[in-house]
Image (tube, helix red, strand yellow):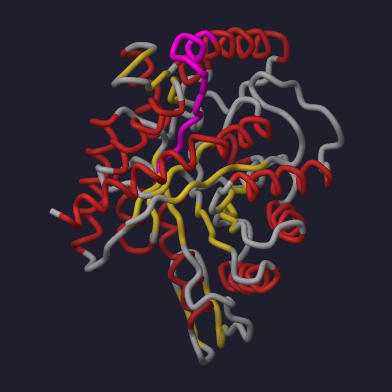
Amino acid sequence: MSIQFLGMIGHRLASEIIPASGPLFDKQYIASFARAHEQAGFDRILVGYWSDQPDGFLVTAHAAAHTSTLKFLLAHRPGFVSPTLAARKLASLDHLTDGRLAVHIISGGSDSEQRRDGDYLDKAQRYARTDEFLSVLKRSLESAAPYDHEGDFYRAEQAFSAIKPLQKKLPVYFGGSSPEAIDVASRHADVFALWGEPLAGAAETVRNVRTAAAKQGRDIKFNISFRPILGKTEKEAWERAEHIRELARHQLNESGYTFGLPKPQSVGAQRLLEAANQGDRLDKVLWTGVAKLVQGGYNSTALVGTPDQVSDALLEYYQLGIDSVLIRGFDPLNDAVEYGEELIPLTREKVAALNAGKRSA
């Protein structure tokens, strides 16, 4: 199997080390950011979901209009749009993007975040709703005839979507480290997404998800997220990492913005914080400096080193069965360009060589 590279775009320039600037919905930046990923050789980009930010459907549509081959991963939270309507929206967007769409389902790891949009279900209820949401969504996307549905969260009579995805099947990504998340993923996910844990933790998650999926007669692929920090030398890369930590610390103190910290209901955040509490540097090049600052609130672990060292680290995760990786930088647009210069092609070369060696053996 080959390796896929995902990026992530925002709707304006901002990061832990760069204060937000420009209009909140910066059309030119969205277009430039998407094109930079396409030119750098990324396969797909994630468009995130926040309770107070621009609509991801429209960000995706705008980015797709300024690219031709780049694929998209649209984050979506169940609970705010009925699954029958969500199916028609996603199918329509898949046509608009010429079949380049996938959806990343997020049940929600923070009660307070959910309540901003009027959702007062607890975590267990959210996962139960997600399970039913995905069942109805898939039926609308695939059913050739109207159907009825009556469940705990949704009811519909003669539901039908005349528009189907341009692709034969719309890929579904799903993440979460709790037993509830793995249970839902085992039935519905095509790709299970992990935050950037140490190798041992990632291997454990892969085993658990595979076991759960096998009980459902299913096979799942895996994606993992990192924030690579590159340098021409190892020393330069680590100096850059420490500089990023200080910039992020300063911006956190100055702005009071929490970047999503902390998420007491998120097992993934707890696992990330546990890793950060083990130390700054884990395995060979995994760095938890910013993850500790934001209390594990989101994908914030970094791989630090030369492109050769970081590609070697990615190869180790690949050998666990994780065949796609989401990489985004602390200087988002410039880092995406930098990744395309050496890290992405070098990693692909190493994966191809590894697979060729296995075939020969």
Tell which residue pokes out farthest to the front in this image: 360
Q: Is residue 122 magenta?
A: no
Near-viewer residue (325 or 113) = 325
Near-viewer residue (177 or 46) = 46
Q: Can residue 193 be seen in this view?
A: no
At horizontal 22% and vertical 68% (from top left) the residue drawn is 217
Near-viewer residue (135 or 300) = 300
Q: Position of residue 119 (x, y in %)?
A: 59, 48
Total residue callouts: 0
As drawn, 335 above or below 211: above
Q: Where is residue 64 in the image (x, y as percent from the top left)?
A: 71, 59
At horizontal 76% and vertical 57% (from top left) the residue drawn is 66
As drawn, 222 above or below 15: below
Tell which residue pokes out farthest to the right in this image: 23
At horizontal 65% and vertical 71% (from top left) the residue drawn is 98
Q: Quadrant of the N terminus?
A: bottom left
Q: Position of residue 185 (x, y in %)?
A: 35, 56
Tell which residue pokes out farthest to the left in this image: 361
Q: Position of residue 300 (x, y in %)?
A: 50, 27
At horizontal 48% and vertical 43% (from top left) the residue drawn is 345
Left or right: where 278 falls relative to 153: left
Q: Does the magenta stretch include residue 237?
A: yes
Left or right: where 33 falls relative to 291: right
Q: Give the range drawn in magenta.
A: 224-239
Tell which residue pokes out farthest to the bottom in this image: 145
Q: Can residue 47 be seen in this view?
A: yes
As drawn, 297 above or below 287: below
